[in-house]
Image (spheres, grey):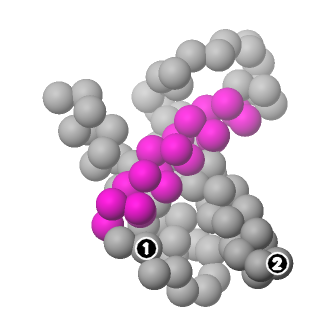
């Protein structure tokens, strides 16, 4: 059940990130979910570097996981757009 939950939260976080970052991207539902899932790992890693204590785990605390996933997905989407604009 953990994988299904991760996909659902990733999809929601990716969709919110796409609403926050201006512009239109032709991502499907699968890429939006992947954006949110990977964004969760990016957000968790950045959060563990910025805030104390510094724990590197694959599963951040539940209360920060959703916000971290949104922030990480926004970071990834901005980087993607910057790279795509240069090409």
Most foreground residue, 57 or 64: 57
Q: Main secondary structure of the magenta part?
A: helix
Q: What stretch is highlighted in magenta?
A: 29-47
The residue shown at (65%, 16%) is 56
Give the residue displayed 62% in from the left and 52% down from the top.
Answer: 71
Residue at 61% x, 86% y is 23
Q: Can you tell which quarter of the image residue 27 is in?
A: bottom left
Q: Where is residue 85 in the image (x, y as percent from the top left)?
A: 76, 81
> Residue at position x 67%, y 66% from top?
80
Q: In this view, does 33 lie to the left or right of 84?
A: left
Residue 1 percent across, percent down from the top left: 17, 29
Q: Quadrant of residue 32?
A: bottom left
How many neighbours does mark 1 have within 10 angstroms: few (below 14), some (14-19), or many (20 or more)?
few
Which mark sits nearer the N-terminus, 2 or 1? Answer: 1
Residue that protrudes farthest toward the left in the picture: 1
Q: Is residue 8 visible?
A: yes
Q: Can residue 13 be seen in this view?
A: no
**Image side of residue 26 versus residue 11, left or right:** right
**Residue under label 1:** 27
Query: CA separation, marks 2 and 1?
Result: 19 Å
Q: Does the stretch in magenta take in 37? A: yes
Mark 2 residue crowding within 10 angstroms, few (<14) / some (14–19) / many (20+): few
How many marks on residues? 2
Given this view, does label 2 or label 1 mark the residue nearer the observer?
A: 2
The image quadrant where one finds the C terminus is: bottom right
Between 32 and 12, the one lying in front of the other is: 32
Secondary structure found at label 1: loop
Residue receiving disc 2: 86
* Pick the front one: 7 or 86: 86
Q: Is mark 2 on a helix, strand or loop?
A: helix
């Amino acid at each position: 059940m953990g994988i299904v939950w991760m996909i659902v939260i990733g999809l929601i976080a990716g969709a919110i990130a796409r609403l926050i970052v201006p512009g239109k991207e032709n991502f499907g539902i699968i890429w939006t979910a992947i954006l949110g899932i990977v964004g969760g790992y990016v957000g968790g890693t950045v959060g563990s570097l910025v805030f104390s204590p510094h724990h590197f785990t694959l599963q951040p605390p539940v209360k920060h996981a959703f916000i971290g996933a949104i922030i990480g997905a926004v970071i990834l989407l901005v980087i993607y757009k910057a790279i795509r604009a240069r090409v």
